[in-house]
Image (spheres, rainbow, N blue to C red):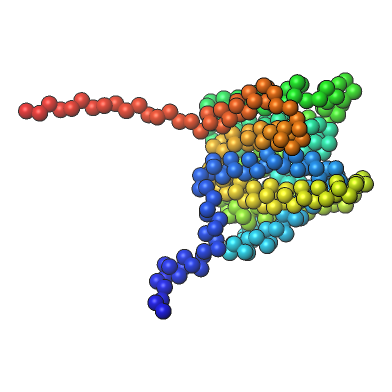
Amino acid sequence: MEKLSKPNAKLLRSAPALRVYLLPRSGFALALLANLIWGTSFLASKVTLTVWGPFTASALRFAAAIAGMLIVLPALGLSIQVPRSRAVWWKVFLIGLSGFGLLYPLQLTGMTAIPSSLSAAIMLTSPLFVLVFASGFLSEALPSQKLAAIGIGIVGGIMLVSPGNLSAAAWSVAAIPQLLKGFTLTLAASLSLAVSVIVTRSATKDLDSRSLTFWSMCVGEALLLPLALGEKHHPSASHDMGMAIVALVFLALFCSVFAFLIWNRALAVASPQEIASTMHVKTPVAVLLGIAVAGEPLTFAIAAGTLLISFAVWLSQWQPKPATISQPKEATS
């Protein structure tokens, strides 16, 4: 049997790892895919809250995600690196705190007071925070075109959750304290998400995206576990428990393992301002799922808001073609 050449033998040995690179290589495309997946998490998270409290739901989700990574990554031939310095561990801790330990409890607690679609719309402020933080902490330029795209996306999000698209009970005087509570907590979650994006961008220079995802998730789990153990539980029907477990597995494998791996990879190859606008797509996905699954009505405002957000994502990436100046042909003798 003919021996394999060294390059071919090396290619075969690394074949399992090559499966990862079937994903898009563009940072923008990776970020868009991650946020499309995360758009489904609002409805799934709402299902888990019928059985568990916000801290317990978050802790169970990331415990399952960590277990999934320990199974999936070796199967793909990928290893997990250990941070080599105290500075890298500090960044990992900040990502775990802002991106897991604070973000999900704040967002899920807020979601107990407001509809999931409204939560998704408030999270639209996160791209704006990302642009501002990238300008202040990473010394990146703040282009007017991207600011305009973020602004248009926020307008589209507001249209998606205008009073006409929510139940009257959500806007009643008696519900205002709950509405304010949900708004404040979700806005804090949005701010926490933006912080995690900036720190992740910095940390990807020191650690590969899969290792960064794993260790920051472990830190988040360590922070969430004591809160989950002290949380009160409420009884649920058996059919609620079954649906909650299905939703939890989906959140762990797809919205945590897969989405975070490709999101952190996107931040490794693209700057935060280049991919910030992709965070807009979570809201229309959440609202459209509400229409398809929860039977919510499709209104003109929802259609218009979705189109505005789509336009905002396109505008953030649009680059005018440079004008070409034709040179006059030299006269020939």
Residue 33: give x, y in percent of width and height. 59, 43
Q: Which x, y percent locates residue 55?
A: 83, 46
User: How far from the left and from the top, in percent, is residue 260?
Assistant: 65, 48
Classify residue 83 as left or right of residue 225: left
Question: Which residue is rendered at x = 60% and y = 25% of the image?
Answer: 308
Q: Is residue 261 above or below residue 84?
A: above
Please determine whether, in this image, residue 47 is positioned above or below residue 179.
below
The quarter of the displayed image where residue 307 is located: top right
Res. 173 visible in picture: yes
Q: Quick one: quadrant of the C terminus?
A: top left
Indicate whether 182 appears above or below 240: above
Q: Residue at x 45, y 70 (%)?
A: 9
Give the vertical position of 32 relative to 63 (above or below): above
Instruction: Give the residue at x 83% y 36%.
Output: 112
At horizontal 60% and vertical 49% (from top left) the residue drawn is: 262
Percent of width and height locating residue 288: 69, 33
- Figure quadrant of residue 332: top left
Quadrant holding the N terminus = bottom left
Query: Residue 297 or 59: which is nearer the viewer?
Result: 297
Residue ranking furthest to the bottom: 1
Q: How many marks?
A: 0
The answer to whether residue 134 is seen in the rendering is: no
